[in-house]
C-alpha cells in the first residue's frame, strides 16, 4: 500500500527538501529506529521503514549495506528496551525474575550496545570493511 500510494517517494522528497546532511540523517534514523524497535517486531519494522529510508540514504550517499546494519542494530537494541521489548519478557519468563528486574539488569548491556551503534553509524568502515565493501 505504501508503494502504490507513493508515500516513500513523497517522504523522500520532503526530507530532502530540508537539505539534511548525512550526519543529521543518520542521527534521525537512529532515533526513529530505536523508538520503532521498542514497539514493533524487527521484521515488520524493516518491511515498513526500509522502503522509506533507503531512497533518502542513497540520495545522501549512505551505503545500503551500512544502512541495513544500522537498521538491524537499532531494532535489536529496541528489543531489549522497555516498554515492549520482547526480549525482556522472554528473559523474565526464563529467569523467573520480574520484567522490571530484567530491564534493570539489561541497562549496562544496552549502554554498551548504544556505544557500538554510535561507532558503527558514524564510522562506516567498521561494518563495511568486514564485508569487503569499505
Image (cartoon, rainbow, N blue to C red):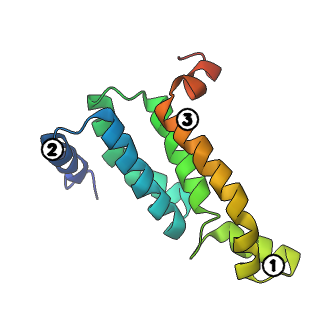
**Pointer 1 or 2: first along the chain:** 2
Q: Is residue 47 visible?
A: no
Tell me if residue 57 comes above or below residue 40 in the rendering.
above
- Residue 48 lies, with reference to residue 104, above or below; the image says above
Q: Earlier in the sequence, mark 2 or mark 3?
A: 2
User: What secondary structure is marked by label 3?
Assistant: helix
- The disc placed on residue 93 is 1
Question: If the image is split into quadrants, where does the N terminus sit?
Answer: bottom left
Q: Dots 2 and 3: beta carbons under 8 Å?
A: no
The image shows residue 129 at horizontal and vertical percentages of 59, 19
Residue at (78%, 77%) from the top-left corner? 92
Q: Is residue 16 left or right of residue 115?
A: left
Q: Using a 10 Å C-alpha cutoff, classify the residue at mark 3 as few (fewer than 14 neighbours), some (14 to 19) or many (20 or more).
A: some
The answer to which quarter of the image holds residue 18 is top left
First in sequence, mark 3 or 1: give its number.
Answer: 1
> Disc 2 versus disc 3: distance between alpha carbons?
25 Å
Residue, disc 2: 18
Q: Which mark is residue 120?
A: 3
Of 21 and 58, nearer the camera is 21
Residue 7 vs 123, above or below: the answer is below
Q: Which residue corresponds to the image point at 71% horizontal and 59% vertical from the top-left?
A: 108
Look at the numbered disc 2 and give the secondary structure of its residue. loop
**Residue at position x 56%, y 76% in the image:** 83
x, y (%) of residue 9? 20, 45
Amino acid at each position: 500500500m505504501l508503494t502504490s500510494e507513493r508515500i516513500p517517494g513523497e517522504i523522500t522528497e520532503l526530507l530532502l527538501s530540508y537539505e539534511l546532511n548525512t550526519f543529521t540523517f543518520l542521527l534521525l534514523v537512529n532515533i526513529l529506529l530505536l523508538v520503532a524497535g521498542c514497539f514493533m517486531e524487527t521484521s515488520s519494522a524493516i518491511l515498513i521503514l526500509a522502503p522509506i529510508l533507503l531512497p533518502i540514504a542513497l540520495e545522501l550517499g549512505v551505503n545500503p549495506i551500512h544502512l541495513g546494519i544500522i537498521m538491524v542494530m537499532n531494532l535489536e537494541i529496541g528489543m531489549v528496551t522497555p516498554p515492549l521489548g520482547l526480549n525482556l519478557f522472554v528473559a523474565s519468563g526464563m529467569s523467573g525474575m520480574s520484567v522490571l528486574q530484567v530491564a534493570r539488569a539489561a541497562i549496562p548491556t544496552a549502554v554498551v550496545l548504544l556505544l557500538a551503534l554510535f561507532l558503527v553509524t558514524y564510522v562506516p568502515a567498521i561494518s563495511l570493511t568486514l564485508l569487503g565493501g569499505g
